[in-house]
Amino acid sequence: MDLQIALLLGQDGVTNGAIYALLALALVLVFAVTRVIFIPQGEFVAFGALTLASLQAGRLPGTVWLLLAMGTAIALIEGATAVRARRFRRLPLILLLNCGAPLLLAASLLAVSPAGLPLPVQVLLTLMLVVPLAPMLYRLAYQPIAEASVLALLIVSVAVHVTLTGLGLVFFGAEGSRTPAFTDASFALGDAVLQGQTVLVIVASILLIVALYFFFERTLYGKALRATAMNRTGARLMGISGDLAGLLSFTLAGAIGAFSGVLISPITTIYYDSGFLIGLKGFVGAIIGGLASYPLAAAGAVLVGFLEAYSSFWASAFKEVIVFTLIIPVLLWRSLKTRHVEEA
Amino acid sequence: MKRSLHSTILLLIFIVALLAAPALLSEFHVTLLNYIGLYAIVTLGLVMLTGVGGLTSFGQAAFAGLGAYTSAYLTTVHGVSPWLTLPAGLLVTAIVALSLGLVTLRLSGHFLPLGTIAWGISLYYLFGNLAALGGHTGISGVPPLHILDVELRSGRDFFYLIWAILLGLILATRNLLDSREGRAIRALKGGSVMAEAMGINTPRSKIVVFAVAALYAAVSGWLYAHLQRFVNPTPFSLTQGIEYLFMAVVGGVSHVWGAILGAGLITVLKQWLQDWLPRLLGESGNFEMIVFGLLMILVLHRARDGVWPMLQRFWPQEVRRAHAESVPRLAKRPLPEPGSVLLEVTDASKCFGGLVANDRVSFRVRAGEIMALIGPNGAGKSTMFNGISGVDPLSSGRVSFRGQRVESLPARRIARLGMSRTFQHVRLLPAMSVIENVAIGAHLRGRKSFIAAACRADRDEDAQLLQEAAMQIERCGLRDQMYEPSGNLPLGRQRLVEIARALAADPCLLLLDEPAAGLRYVEKQALAELLRRLRAEGMGILLVEHDMEFVMGLADRVVVMEFGRKLAAGLPEEIQRNPAVVEAYLGGVE
């Protein structure tokens, strides 16, 4: 391996590592706030990338149907609850939020041809289509059993994951997609060439992490989420609704996932089931951080990115084996560090 | 075990139906039943792991893969007999499961399933990329099994072997769960604190149940390799591992028969969906997973116990209502000389961050005396209990028990020395009967391993343990509720069950945390009588209690704590006159 290849691989490693780091942060956030191990995080990456690709190809992305279906399901459940409680005045809002908004979005996609729109608008549309799925998932799949054990929530997560992957196949087909690069710019770095897209991914990731930091440190909702993560009961007694905290953390995780998908789609070809492995690599990073520490999780994720890049050079067939076997020494290290663990 | 007539008849009908099945059914349906049997073997392991032990794994398919690939490789490359590759496959699986278990089982519950996801993926890619294992095309030409001189070539030939093994494993699993080791595994679900305080080595129990589940999967994989005569990575992927868990949850994760039911339901449903969904959607793919995923979410929302308990409602439940009475009693520990020092606590301190919950507290408890630890709420009494019993070790200070330093020993080692305790917040397993809960206390008085339990070689010892439990239950005045689920008892009586469980350990020092709370007057008197009797037998008792009448009428000596410090110590009458104590309890006169 000469320096040029090393730099090239390093570039790959940092780019993927940045994406994994974002996902790791989202996973830590969701776990800390809701105790849900959010396996479907990866599906949001795939859905983000593939929705953008569909829009650019001038097709109506299948996620529209999912949004409409889930919105209707929520409207039915919430509507039934409201009717039973004789609070009819809530009905218009429920309908507007869960059915009206998705319908409006679908109608506008049909009215204009999204393929001709400028890239930022396409990205915005993608986010509007994919991100709301996350809080909707929380409402439908997790909120009814929010008090269940971590184990039961994990099984639900896996069930949601297989459902979404299957739907991904229905929506986007078995073929992969790759979107054109956001920028053609490139920079010379010694002998190697630094791609503009790589720089974009890294800068966007760092910006997002900084934004998250300010959200958690400076805003009321951010503080509410931190409070819930520290002590659920205590936060509830202070008037922070557990459901709201759950919805909010899922929205953030969905946004991070979909945005990561948009960022990564010009770099790698994304298939309907690619999200799972991408999400799991974020997980390996998150586990290095013990599902608790944000900086450690991000550092772990970058490490995973490097490991992946260099092992794809040395032993490309065993790339996944190496990355996922890394979890075992990590768990061993964590288990030696933990002296006494009592499950709640 | 006594079984009700209904269950026996149902079981017989089931066995007769199985015996007749190959003669009556088409090749297709026999194959389907073969697969259901193979899946049910893996699922049975998951039932034990998830439903009983409270752990879970998505990597069972990978363990099945280890069993299958070991056999396929050894028989095709080295020409080893399939009957020798079975133990070889089990050995490989056991080694992998034990090392994986040792790494993850000490961490909290969710690290194990996450580890198994990663492990399931990495093994799948390993199978697919190792040239020696045939890569993604796999290994073909695996030899068929021979039983004596009969070659098992067709699915029909295999049918009886698969179902005989499955029924054998179900029997072994039932036997295991109804034994000392089985109760230890069931105790895992209630958290490790209680189990450890009763002397159960919880990491060991977890590893045992994890390894057993992995071995079941390996047996299924071995059968699969010789039934198919071909292996490739696909059936051992993470997706299949997830499907196994779905089978367990849908069937009923806490019931051994739920394994067959779940495997049957999911397999038949999958067959059906794979026929219909591609026609409906106009293309092919794993669309059945969409339905399975939704079904799973629905089951977990609406019927977390799965389908088996719903069926179970249609026939009367067997309730075991007898234990052997005429077995030799368990050997008792020789009690120390009355008046000798049992427990000596010196300068015990415990800090939680900046909060000092115990601040240099010292006292002694002698054999044959009742010593009461009293003080206002938040004085640090329960913290002291946890420190002494090793549940939550002290920050500093010394505890010696029967002359041995114990402050840095784990709770189960202290329990082995003869200290037993109850908990302020009752820690029983609500679904288990009172007698089984109490028998957990006698865990350390048995020796038989889980292998002995699986083949019923432990019956004499188990009868002794249950008889001991029954005796302690009667002593605590709960004779009529012996076979009720402990969760059905009122809280006060659940505390008595805790005392019976502590007594079943044959302790020489008993730690009781608020035993009289929630008891009625007559029950309190009976409890006081019991404690006096235990004292007369030479047991030492350390008591935390708020009911002053109860304490002052019973205790030989009293230690008063306030804000983590020892405020006073002495005879009950001295304590009652002590102005500092009166001030602590009633507030000072300004």
Image (cartoon, rainbow, N blue to C red):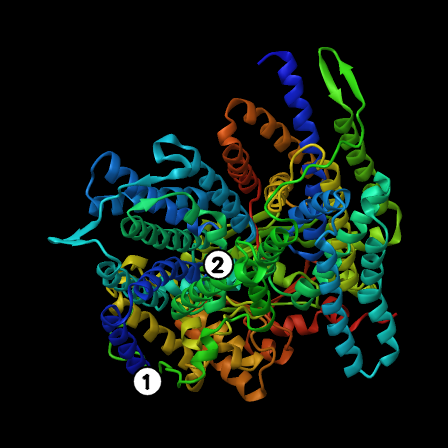
- Residue under pointer 1: B6
Under tag 2, what secondary structure?
A: helix
Q: Is residue B546 left or right of residue B522?
A: right
Residue A46 position in % (x across, y down): 67, 45
- Residue designated by label 2: B245
| Residue drawn where x is 85% and y is 68% of the image | A96
Q: Is any part of residue B339 visible from this angle?
A: no
SS at circle 1 = helix
User: Which quadrant of the structure image shows residue B550?
Assistant: bottom right
Residue A263 left/right relative to B272 = right
* Residue B536 position by quadrant: bottom left
Q: Chain of mark 2?
A: B
- Which residue sits at x=87%, y=70%? A93
Question: What chain does badge 1 belong to?
Answer: B
Q: Which circle's residue, 2 or 1, is located before the other in the chain?
A: 1
Please tell me which residue lies in front, A230 or B476.
A230
Q: Residue at x 24, y 61 (%)?
A: B156
Residue B272 showing in the rendered view = yes
